[in-house]
Amino acid sequence: MFEKLNAANLFKKKKLTPAEKEFISNNRNFWSDYPAKSDGNYKILVEQPSIPTATHSLATITIILNQAKSFTPVWLHSRDWNIELLKSYVSTAEYIKYPKSFVNVLNIILISIYKYMNIVKTKDILSFSYDGVKYGDIVYDTYLAHEKVATIKNIDIKLLFVIFVCIYKHEKFRKILDSDTFKAVLVSHQVTIDSGVLLRTALRYGYKGYINTGTHRTTLQCFEKLDDVYNYQHKPFPEDIDDIITKLGSKFDLVYNSVYNEYISGNCSKDATYAFSKDIIYYTDRKSFDYDYKLDSTKKNVFVMLHAFTDYPHSHFRWMIFNDYYDWFIETLKFAKKHDNVNWIFKQHPSIKYYPAKDVSFDALFSDIPDNIIYISENDQIDTRSLIYCADIVVTCLGSAGFEMPAMAGIPSITASDNFYTNLGFAIEPKTKNEYFETLSNTHNVERLTPEQQKRAQAAFMFIHKFSIVNNSACPPIISHDDHIDSMIISKHMNKIYELYGKNEKIIKSELNDCIKEVSEMNFRRLNSLYHFLENY
């Protein structure tokens, strides 16, 4: 039933270019210090290779898992990638594909129709599950992303197709995992209908799930049960916060300032390059901001930090008060129009142009608003650091502003969802709509955080932006949103890798050796640079 593809088979499907042949030779030589460990009883199913940046990062992780756990990587087949490219990392790497079966597809169609009709009846997409696995969040978010809409106003036939694909992939992955001696899977996200379904299917049937996110600054986690998928890769637990505060001691402020300066430089994430850009206005005093936006300076400034509506609102975390990001935004805007005791500043997400939503017109929504409400659009952005001086409170559904502003300036934050800094002791976290709007009603009375609360937020800031991550110097620095769709990205990416290999060989292999040592531990759960940092600080 399952066809394993060797190099000879694949050459017929994807012919190597001269540049790819050269890369294979150089790449194989570079990683020759790590000869493949082979154990027929230890295989790991790796998601389908996609863009070069993500695939190169995943491939370096297969080296770590092969050396630490003796896992032989078996990649899901992609006609766009030759197996020889993947074997240049781990020489025993394999490809596997799953042939279509009309009988299976017909059965899945019938199940999908039944599930879809139930959703039409109940209007509850998030409750959808299959084979004991919760998939409603992935289905909802996939619909938003694929249809480029901010919310689901009407349940239509397109949702049936998403449900079908979800069930089809679940069955496809289940049968692949059952076909050989797999012990685990490796994915690049816990969301999306590809990575997310593969991860959850594996966990459902007792396989371990490894998730690698990032490129030159990467994370690696090991999940063993389904509920683990909501443990976001950068999530600090209360004991992590306590460790940072206790063990850094008198050096706490020095380390925080170092992490802060690195973050605002834009070298940590794509979104940071837009949030802290030299090309946009940076306010360093509230008087100028209030004057420019004609705000009453006697009122508190409440910044509502908008989300990219199509960027998977549900499947990262366990729950949110509202239906989705759009529902949260529109209900908050309605509330703001009725409450003029504070200034409401709705600030657009810095990367919004890469997440278009065809069913939303912000110009129309903000065309008729009271004087105490302003909208900062993507074309009129301000540097996010301006909030240090101009904001009294920030409101977010589950965004990073909810810990960044508390850390940077002791500014209180209000959230409307489970997130990666929940229950750490500095955010205001209503659990129901009533509590949320009651909290908003009291924004004029909310005071700055105490020094102890701000310190906990700073510890979270350090963990999220520094210690939850390990360096992977084999991968090029941040790839922009524009580069992801660049037709020349493959050749550019190869050239950048060559450059890194020549310049950073000792660093790359030292980092890899540290990761191999940590991952090889029996109870490995996630890579974490905190304790390594503390040992060498």
Image (cartoon, rainbow, N blue to C red):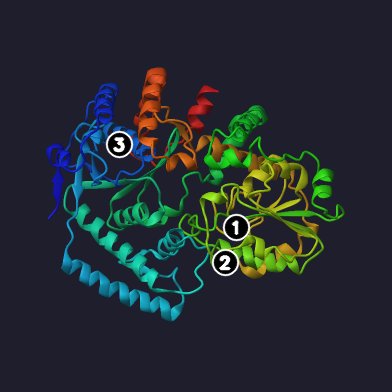
Give residue 163's quadrant in the image: bottom left
Q: Residues within 10 Å of mark 1 (few under 14, many from 20)?
A: many
Question: Taking the image as drawn, is residue 64 in sight?
Answer: yes
Mark 1, secondary structure of its residue: loop
Coordinates of residue 434 in the picture (x, y in percent):
66, 70
In the depicted structure, whether residue 228 falls above or below residue 124? above
Label 3–label 2 contact, CB within 8 A: no
Q: Residues within 10 Å of mark 2 (few under 14, many from 20)?
A: some
For mark 3, give the secondary structure.
Answer: helix
Q: Which mark is residue 322?
A: 2
Name which of mark 1 and mark 2 comes first in the sequence: 2
Residue 235 picture location, percent across and down:
51, 46
Amino acid on which the number 3 mark rests in the picture = Thr
Apparent side of residue 129 relative to residue 154 in the rendered image (left or right): left
Q: Nearer the viewer, residue 315 or 498?
A: 498
| Identity of the residue drawn at 51% across and 27% down | 533
The residue indicated by pointer 1 is 397
Residue type for callout 1: Cys
Q: Secondary structure at mark 2?
A: loop
Quarter holding the C terminus is top right
Separation of residues labelled 3 and 2 (CA atoms): 39 Å
**Mark 2: which amino acid?**
Phe
Disc with the residue nearer the chain's start (3 vs 2):
3
Most foreground residue, 29 or 469: 29
Residue on which disc 3 sits? 62
Q: Of all residues shown, which one is farthest toward the right?
A: 298
Is 318 on the left-hand or right-hand side of 174? right
Q: Is residue 469 above or below residue 295?
A: above
